[in-house]
Amino acid sequence: MSRFILIAVLCVSSVVFAAAPKSGYANVNGVKMYYEISGSGPDLVLLHGGICTIEGCFGALIPSLAKNRRVIAFEFQAHGHTPDIDRKLSVDALVSDTLKAMDQLGVKKTDLLGYSMGAAVALELAVAHPERVNKLMLLSGAFSPDGVHPGMNDMSGITPELFKGTPWLASYEKAAPASEKNGVGFAKLINRIKEVDDSRAIDPEKIRALKSPVFVLIGDSDIITPEHAVKLFRLVGGGVAGDMVPMANSRLAILPATTHARLMERAPLIAQFVTEFLAAETR
């Protein structure tokens, strides 16, 4: 799943929240997992991409979503405010961390949105624990390695030096614990990202069995291929002739002139799509 962060994630937003979020830490599996809560209403959990932070991935998106939702955003092990621990970074570990953090915050069932590596975690969580998810939103996510453009899985050439002067490094340094600043923690994070399994795949039948409506969203120049996004959409009931039969509860969007790393810069459009999806009645 490290393929999801090969190009890193996005430019850091300069958005200032209208109201400061409530923040804290959930102690899960030995991880001091940072979270922020904004707004009120039904729960919506956000899971960021690799080499990113809450602000970096979702700073421009949260204000819109928090108008009608209690938006809970987590930062994964070694990312942002959350310190690293002596544990391999894996999708399974992040799923477990997320579930236990949800438990501590009293979130029994939630709408769930994941971007990039966060989409991998969100999909695995929904498949393994469908009772915890209402609606599922997968932004730049794939369920198997063949959904990624060839050559995008190789992380061997990714080094901390490549990120000097970039918004990704600036975002990390802004959020990181004091002991992890000045490049110390970021170098560890790059090595952690290389640990995440590239080759795992989810059985398509398990995805087909999902009861949750799913919103599949990618850029047209994403590292995820359009064909894979359509395949995923069909697995969750999409691709019907809606003028002849009832439309599916799931949705698909492919944003024009949009890459993987810059997808979240389309936050106003994504917020509109997500808000409409969450408000739609499930048929």
Image (cartoon, rainbow, N blue to C red):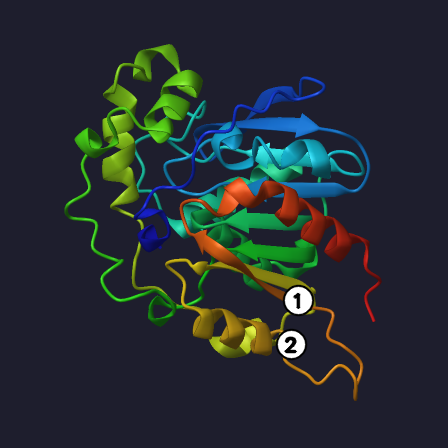
Q: In the image, is 179 to the left or to the right of 56?
A: left
Q: In the image, is 262 to the left or to the right of 1?
A: right
Mark 1 Cα-neighbour bin, 10 Å: few <14, some 14–19, many ≥20:
many
Q: Are marks 1 and 2 in contact (CB under 8 Å)?
A: yes
Name the disc covering residue 251, or none: 1
Residue furthest to the top in view is 178
Residue 196 horizontal/vertical position (percent): 31, 49
Q: How many callouts does the rendering have?
A: 2
Mark 1 or 2, nearer chain start: 2
Residue 18 horizontal/vertical position (percent): 71, 20
Which residue shows up at 26% across the image and 66% down it? 150
Which residue shows up at 23% across the image and 28% down it? 187
Q: In the image, is 9 to the left or to the right of 242?
A: left
Name the disc covering residue 238, or none: 2
Residue furthest to the front in view is 257
Which residue shows up at 47% across the image and 58% down it? 141
Q: Answer above or below: position of 16 versus 10.
A: above
Residue 104 horizontal/vertical position (percent): 64, 33
Quick one: 161 or 243, which is closer to the camera? Answer: 243
